[in-house]
Amino acid sequence: MAFNSNQKLREEFLNYNPQSGGMRTNSYRPFKLSIRLFGRMGHGKSTFINNCLCVVKDTEYRTEAGEGDPQGSFTVELKRYRLSDYVEIVDNIGAKSYSSNECYEFRAQLDGYRKVGEQVGFGGWGSYFWDCMTSRNSDWQNTIYIPVIVYRGDFPSFEKEKQMIKPLIDSARKFTGMWPIIVVTHATEIGNFNVKAIFQSLHCPDVFLLNNYYCKDDQKVPVERNEETDEMILMILFQCLKRAKEVIESVTTEYKPAKFN
Ligand SMILES: Nc1nc2c(ncn2[C@@H]2O[C@H](COP(=O)(O)OP(=O)(O)OP(=O)(O)O)[C@@H](O)[C@H]2O)c(=O)[nH]1
Ligand SMILES: [Mg+2]
């Protein structure tokens, strides 16, 4: 099934090990990278995970992370999927409106205070405060988080959205050391918006336009894989590695800082 030109990229992704490479000794080396997804309900987060899994593993498209109704919130668990020995991708609940409670929840996740494998809701500041009294995920110190925001290309109010997602974008930069990578799904349906310019004005330089593989509604038959989507998925994953490497190199001590400048 593999498209030849992409096979090398796939192998390179699978072989990436954050423990190796780098010039300095005694410097910070994480055990793994954790891609963290954010975005509105139904914008394609779980479908994006299914896409990453089938492209990296070179299988037919399957709905491993589910694939929900575009109208309702389908995913309610912070659930981890393994892409390689060293890279995981974590599914998330979808935001309704980027309310302050939702932003607190996302911030708590980025700060390491939400446990992967548990249900997610929007308990707001109270529950964030409570979680901060407990402890971070046990693997927080040894994990580099990579924030990825997923947006539907036919979303009608990209311009208005700017102010609503700014707190999330700024939290992501503060807690992970990088600006979120933006994945715009339903790429062929993008309206009259310069989505790249919109996200770049929020400091996000990495904007990818993607047509996800998905199951056609009625028969649940997956669309066939094609070279273009395979390549886009691999490009997005490589950008995740690149940004993570930059953060790792920027850490000058043996430990990952709780906040980045
Ligand atoms: N045509 C098309 N459909 C897509 C694309 N990405 C996702 N979909 C469809 O959009 C719907 C919602 O996708 P999900 O992946 O469940 O969305 P989600 O962000 O996980 O949603 P929640 O779990 O509710 O937050 C599904 O019916 C998918 O088949 C895309 O790029 N193109
Ligand atoms: Mg989902």
Image (cartoon, rainbow, N blue to C red):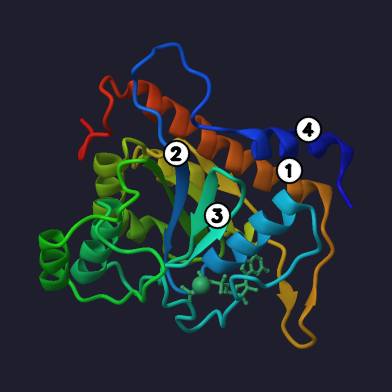
Q: What is the three-letter code of the residue carrying label 4?
A: Lys
Q: What is the three-letter code of the residue carrying label 1?
A: Glu
Q: Residue at x 32, y 64 (%)?
A: 115
Asked if 143 appears above or below 213 in the picture, the reply is above
Q: CA distance from mark 3 to mark 2?
A: 29 Å
> Label 3: few (<14), some or many (≥20) within 10 Å?
many
Sequence-first tag of 3 and 1 = 3
Asked if 47 appears above or below 9 in the picture, the reply is below
Mark 3 or mark 1, whichever is nearer to me: 1
Asked if 70 appears above or below 249 in the picture, the reply is below
Q: Are marks 3 and 2 in contact (CB under 8 Å)?
A: no
Left or right, residue 55 beside residue 132: right
> Label 4: few (<14), some or many (≥20) within 10 Å?
few
Q: Are marks 3 and 1 in contact (CB under 8 Å)?
A: no
Q: What is the three-letter code of the residue carrying label 3?
A: Val
Q: How many marks?
A: 4
Q: CA distance from mark 4 to mark 2?
A: 24 Å
Percent x, y of residue 238: 60, 36
Q: Nearer the viewer, residue 78 or 221?
A: 78
For label 2, the residue is 31
Q: Nearer the viewer, residue 139 or 237?
A: 139
